[in-house]
Amino acid sequence: MRKAFISLFAAVAAIAASTGARAEDKVLTVYTYESFTGEWGPGAKVAEAFEKSCGCKVEYVSVADGVELLTRLKLEGASSKADIVLGLDTNLIAEAKATGFFVPHGVDLSAVKVPGGFSDADFVPYDYGHFAVVYDTQAMKEPPKSLKELVEGDPSQKIVIEDPRTSTPGLGLLLWVKSVYGEEAGAAWAKLKDRVLTVTPGWSEAYGLFTKGEAPMVLSYTTSPAYHMISENTDRYQAAPFSEGHYIQIEVAGITKSAKDPALARDFLSFVVGPQFQSIIPTTNWMMPVAEGQDALPEAFSKLVVPEKTFLMSSDEVAANRKAWIDEWISAMSGK
């Protein structure tokens, strides 16, 4: 009898060990950008919350910024280990689809609400924000009130911007300038270059230089001041409302064709538009949620700039012109 009990116990233990091993082997690889996985970003909280329900391990692979994500996928091709790509935006959707790397998500987006609406078979939105010039009120008493004032203002009052070749904010500024100036965008950049302290590969580097006092302005988001109000209890850093309007960024995530477990990847995207993920985003990624969260937005969010006009080009238009517009930017910024 004792032998039988021991044998039964051993069998149960073996099954449990096997099941545990399989759970540990169940890994979801998410490609994203560095500020998402950084110390103060949402990455750790998102992983912890999803892992409680998925019986899996979330592993992140991060690059400097969103545009670089697409570049990396193109380089890796079919050998990419990404199951999920999180950090592209609507400006890159057409180009991302053209790679053939993404598959339909099959996620219910009926609860999603973003300015102008959103509907796409391959990509799920997870947050949004309007680009803005954020300024230091202690270093700058009269910030620009328009893109025109930014372009034509005092060259001694510098701004840090991001590179449109690697960064989604950098690309956003490029499209913002193009939306306002059209055919005169090159001339606008030629004027603005004297105000640019430096061009960084991604948002994190740019914002870090700004908060260290290297420049009184940085290209960021209307939501950025909420971080300082909530985490640092200061109104020192503010977003300048621009009379022409602001360009919007809607960040998205998608499932790759090479996903090891498509069902798990789909579960993650469903989680992304759910209340738990959406509650994490505002005070970690410092962007607006695309759906209702478990908690109301902090009061600081009611104090943020609300643009009177929103710019957003179609992803097809961006895909068709991105290279030419970046070449125009390079030419203007280099003085050629």
Image (spheres, helix red, strand yellow):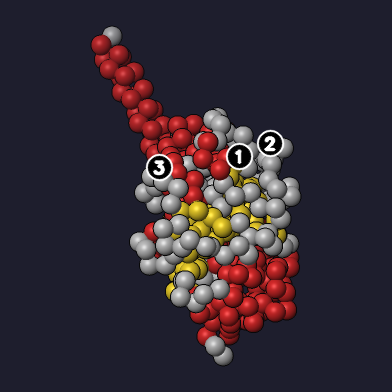
Amino acid type at mark 1 = Val
The vertical placement of 313 against 119, above or below, is below
The vertical placement of 19 against 80, above or below, is above
Residue 198: quarter of image: bottom left
Residue 133: quarter of image: bottom right
Residue 137: quarter of image: bottom left
User: Residue 195: x, y in percent?
Assistant: 50, 75
Marks 2 and 1, how far apart in space?
8 Å
Residue 233 is tagged as: 3
* Residue hosting label 1: 273
Callout 1 environment at 10 Å: few (<14), some (14 to 19), or many (20+)?
A: many
Quadrant assignment for the N terminus: top left
In percent of the image, x 49 and y 45: which residue is there?
A: 226
The vertical placement of 207 against 22, above or below, is below
Amino acid type at mark 2 = Ala
Amino acid type at mark 3 = Asn
Marks 3 and 2, how far apart in space?
32 Å
Q: Residue furthest top?
A: 1
* Residue hosting label 2: 111
Name which of mark 1 and mark 3 comes first in the sequence: 3
